[in-house]
């Protein structure tokens, strides 16, 4: 029986209130917290996933494959898209809020013993690993928060596999101002374990990662057939089907396949797992009243490839509803996306970190004619003129967009 006192406080709300204090980098606090918790990370076979883009997709694919292989698997990812519980999954299913609250409470209690208090994300990391170990998971798929080397998830002491999905310019104030600097940060998760990377990384970064022992995946991957339902791909002489759209997802699938083969999983489990894998908020299609809505959480120029491919292949007029956070490249987004749309509506992201409305508007308005502002996502969607509407730029937009769309059924 769990102590009733653990249910008397909303620790999920407590974590969310802490998020406004921002992040602190380094693994010391998370390492100390895991030690106080009895090193739950040492009781799990951990697959650690880093990358500028594609982390969530690879985590979803690996989780689905492991579940098909009857391996009980915990998955910790961030940020959530539609519900906080999505961050803490067991066998691909979000844990109940009461369970998450219990393990967050344990982490909070241990954090009180520390002089250098952990951040919200460090508490979540500890709670997730504690949950997975206590709930009897064999594997844990853990997504890096930012970078790799100095991310709190890198306090994990033992890993089964490390995965780096992509490397592009991002968070340059923290990770470095060039590809190689960022690549070295990502490579920091390769710590006494095998590693898998895709073959489409920047050449210098790929060479560096191969020199530190990574295995390259995806060089023979090809698309056989593609539709809005997904892609049939061929890799290493075998056909697979994935529901994820865009060329980048072919490389993500190849990485997941390579990881599964290295873990000794049967090919039939890999095929079924990939076919069943789903992820929220990445080129997610919703059809309502004759209109196609596409929800996509891409938030940096390098991530817009899949959504650009899909939108570019669609016929008819299209509307973009765009909002982003203050540290994102709105100019780069406008350059990558704007030319695909007949109408662009900028909207403030529902976050204290939202980009200034004028800055976001002029990123698009300086390049395209049919650009206007809306005060919120409901106004933007309600005023969209075309039969295809894409919501993009930040995961923070997607929950409100989905709620509005579903209420219109």
Image (cartoon, rainbow, N blue to C red):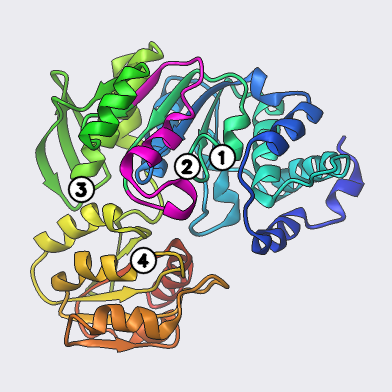
Location of residue 113 with respect to 38 vertically, above or below:
below
- Labels 4, 2: front one: 2
Comparing 72 with 190, the one in front is: 190
- Whether tag 2 and tag 1 are in contact, CB under 8 A, the answer is yes
Q: Which mark is residue 246?
A: 3
Residue 180 on the magenta span: yes
| Other-residue count near label 3 (Cα within 10 Å), few / some / many at <14 / 14–19 / ≥20 | many
User: In the figure, is residue 74 to the left or right of 175?
Assistant: right
Residue in view at x 37 percent, y 36 percent: 183
User: In the figure, is residue 175 to the left or right of 198?
Assistant: right
Distance, label 3 to label 2, CA atoms, is: 24 Å
Q: Position of residue 229 (x, y in %)?
A: 21, 49
Secondary structure of the residue carrying tag 2 is loop
- Whether tag 4 and tag 3 are in contact, CB under 8 A, the answer is no
- Labels 3, 2: front one: 2
Comparing 177 with 66, the one in front is: 177
Comparing 131 with 185, the one in front is: 185
Location of residue 149 with respect to 369 vertically, above or below:
above
| Other-residue count near label 4 (Cα within 10 Å), few / some / many at <14 / 14–19 / ≥20 | many
């Amino acid at each position: 029986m769990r102590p009733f006192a653990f249910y008397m406080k909303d620790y999920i709300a407590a974590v969310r209130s802490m998020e406004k204090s921002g992040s602190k980098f380094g693994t010391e606090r998370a390492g100390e917290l895991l030690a106080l918790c009895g090193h739950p990370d040492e009781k799990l076979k951990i697959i650690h996933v880093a990358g500028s883009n594609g982390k969530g997709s690879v985590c979803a694919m690996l989780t689905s494959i492991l579940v098909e292989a009857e391996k009980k698997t915990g998955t910790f990812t961030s940020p959530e898209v539609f519900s906080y519980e999505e961050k803490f999954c067991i066998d691909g299913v979000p844990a109940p809020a009461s369970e998450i609250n219990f393990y967050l409470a344990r982490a909070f209690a241990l954090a009180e013993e520390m002089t250098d208090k952990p951040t919200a994300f460090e508490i979540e990391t500890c709670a997730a690993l504690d949950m997975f170990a206590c709930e009897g998971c064999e594997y844990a798929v853990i997504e890096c928060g930012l970078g790799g080397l100095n991310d709190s998830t890198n306090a994990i002491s033992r890993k089964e596999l490390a995965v780096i999905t992509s490397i592009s310019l991002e968070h340059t104030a923290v990770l470095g101002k060039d590809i190689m600097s960022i690549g070295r940060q990502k490579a920091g998760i390769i710590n006494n374990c095998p590693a898998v990377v895709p073959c489409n990384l920047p050449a210098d970064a790929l060479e560096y990662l191969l020199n530190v022992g990574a295995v390259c995946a995806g060089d023979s991957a090809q698309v056989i057939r593609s539709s809005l339902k997904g892609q049939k791909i061929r890799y290493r002489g075998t056909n697979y089907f994935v529901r994820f759209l865009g060329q980048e997802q072919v490389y993500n699938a190849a990485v997941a396949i390579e990881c599964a083969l290295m873990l000794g999983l049967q090919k039939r489990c890999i095929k079924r797992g990939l076919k069943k894998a789903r992820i929220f908020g990445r080129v997610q299609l919703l059809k309502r009243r004759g209109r196609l809505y596409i929800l996509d959480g891409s938030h940096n120029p390098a991530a817009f490839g899949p959504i650009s491919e899909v939108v570019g292949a669609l016929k008819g007029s299209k509307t973009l509803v765009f909002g982003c956070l203050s540290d994102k490249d709105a100019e780069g987004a406008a350059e990558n996306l704007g030319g695909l749309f007949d109408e662009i509506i900028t909207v403030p992201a529902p976050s204290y970190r939202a980009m200034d409305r004028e800055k976001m508007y002029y990123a698009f308005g300086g390049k395209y004619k049919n650009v206007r502002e809306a005060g919120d996502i409901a106004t933007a969607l309600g005023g969209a003129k075309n039969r295809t509407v894409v919501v993009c730029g930040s995961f923070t937009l997607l929950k409100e967009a989905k709620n509005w769309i579903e209420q219109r059924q």
